[in-house]
Image (cartoon, rainbow, N blue to C red):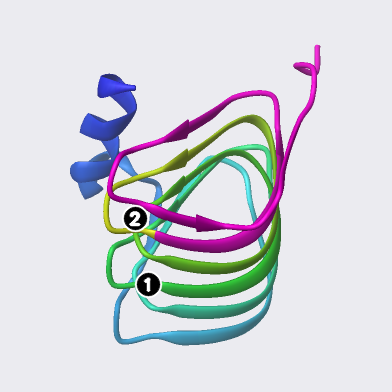
């Protein structure tokens, strides 16, 4: 997990960053990596890596390869590879994933279904 955390902390290694002063509603579709620092409400679809920043508030139905949560998230999350909940994050969601990491100090309220890894 250390290598992923290094990428997340260096925004230059992330393909797209949605700034903290932006509010979006709708459907987001992306291929590689996306960090949300602002507010988003809607649906997110990707095979890539979604990062919810510390200052972010996301209310969405999410399907992604990897989802890393540092901020607040409400909804449903389906990750084909992994879900990561970091310290000080607040996650109120139903999770479906083959691999999960919950760091001490994070808040998780919801259900978690562990699936087998997709080939």
On the image, numbered disc 1 is attached to which residue? 56
Q: Where's the N terminus, which quadrant?
A: top left
Which residue is nearer to you in this view: 94 or 40?
Answer: 94
Residue 113 lies in magenta, yes or no?
yes
Residue at point 33%, 61% (across, down): 53
In the image, which disc is placed on residue 70? 2
Instruction: Read off the magenta span.
Output: 90-119
* Above or below 21: residue 48: above
Of the 4 image quadrants, the one containing the C terminus is top right
| Rendering coords of residue 55 (x, y %) | 28, 72
Front residue of 4/11: it is 4
Residue 60 in sight from this viewpoint: yes
The reply to whether discs 1 and 2 touch (Cβ–Cβ < 8 Å) is yes
Against 82, is 2 above or below?
Answer: above
Q: Is residue 58 left or right of residue 105?
A: right
The residue that appears at 31% across and 74% down in the rendered structure is 19
Element assignment for label 2: loop
């Amino acid at each position: 997990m250390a290598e992923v955390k290094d990428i997340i902390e260096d925004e230059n290694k992330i393909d797209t960053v949605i700034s903290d002063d932006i509010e979006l509603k709708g459907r987001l579709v992306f291929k590689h990596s996306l960090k949300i620092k602002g507010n988003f409400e809607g649906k997110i679809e990707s095979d890539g890596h979604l990062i919810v920043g510390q200052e972010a508030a996301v209310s969405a139905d999410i399907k992604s390869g990897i989802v890393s949560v540092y901020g607040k998230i409400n909804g449903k999350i389906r990750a084909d590879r992994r879900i990561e909940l970091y310290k000080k994050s607040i996650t109120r969601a139903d999770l479906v994933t083959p691999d999960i990491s919950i760091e001490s100090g994070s808040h998780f309220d919801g259900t978690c279904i562990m699936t087998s890894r997709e080939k």
